[in-house]
Image: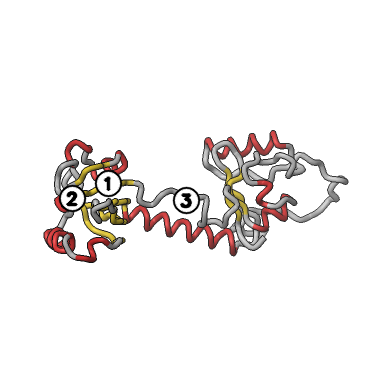
Amino acid sequence: MNGPVNAEGAGAGEGGPPPEPCPATAWVDRVGTVQLWSAEAEALLGYPAEEVCGTPAVELLATRGDREAALARRDRPEAGQRWDGVLALRHRAGHEVSVALRVRPLTDREGRAGWSVSAGDARRIEREDLDRAMLRALFEQYPGPIALVDGELRYRLLNAAAERVLTHPGNRLIGGHVGTDTSPVGSGTIDRVLRQVRVRPVPAPGPISTSSPRRPPRPSRRWAAPPGARRSSS
């Protein structure tokens, strides 16, 4: 395969689909009054629907300049066009929230019924976009095997090196439990170690292995030391 595969069989950072970046929704009528207000919109800005519905949408804009610009655009011919951008909105607690907005015109038999507005926290969206880009780069460029598992220890994302080690294509592994028909190590051992790491997020103490060496090790005068340890002069 050419790149990492995720739970939907798409490349990392592509389909899946990722969480909706602008989950908060509202409907604003043709005169600019809020008519519908979702629970996600309340979570974003703090206002319950009963406080917002029936009020001018521009009152949510934090700056006077943005409010004036929105009112000026409302009655222009281009008001029927879609618009994407980031604006500062007022939170019910009094502070400003940088909000990514997707505004889409709605039409009825008379021509225009208002706008559908989707919104999300712009800073969170930026962080998640960066995280996805870094994750994709890690999975595509790191030469060693990497796999992500969910809370039930099922494969959710693998890179090409992991497929080679597990000797199965990613599309077959995704959704399957870790260790099932893919590893010489017993699935019970893998399950125990991964659950231990999930409960107490520290690295596993070492490689997981249940097999014994084929022959006894030969006597040797070599010693292993942890990285950074210095050899004694004595």
Q: Residues within 10 Å of mark 3 (few under 14, many from 20)?
A: few
The residue located at (62%, 52%) in the rendering is 158
Q: Secondary structure at mark 2?
A: helix
Question: If the image is split into quadrants, where does the C terminus sit?
Answer: bottom right
Q: Position of residue 34 (x, y in %)?
A: 20, 46
Q: Secondary structure at mark 1?
A: strand
Amino acid type of the residue tagged 3 in the rendering: Pro
Alpha-carbon distance for marks 3 and 1?
21 Å
Q: Position of residue 214 (x, y in %)?
A: 86, 45
In the picture of the structure, the residue carrying the numbered disc 2 is 57
Q: Which is more N-terminal, label 2 or label 1? A: 1
State if disc 2 and disc 1 touch (CB < 8 Å). yes
In the picture of the structure, the residue carrying the numbered disc 3 is 18
Q: Position of residue 195 (x, y in %)?
A: 59, 36
Q: Position of residue 222 (x, y in %)?
A: 76, 56
Amino acid type of the residue tagged 2 in the rendering: Ala
Q: Which is more N-terminal, label 2 or label 3? A: 3
Alpha-carbon distance for marks 1 and 2?
10 Å
Q: Which mark is residue 26?
A: 1
Amino acid type of the residue tagged 1 in the rendering: Ala
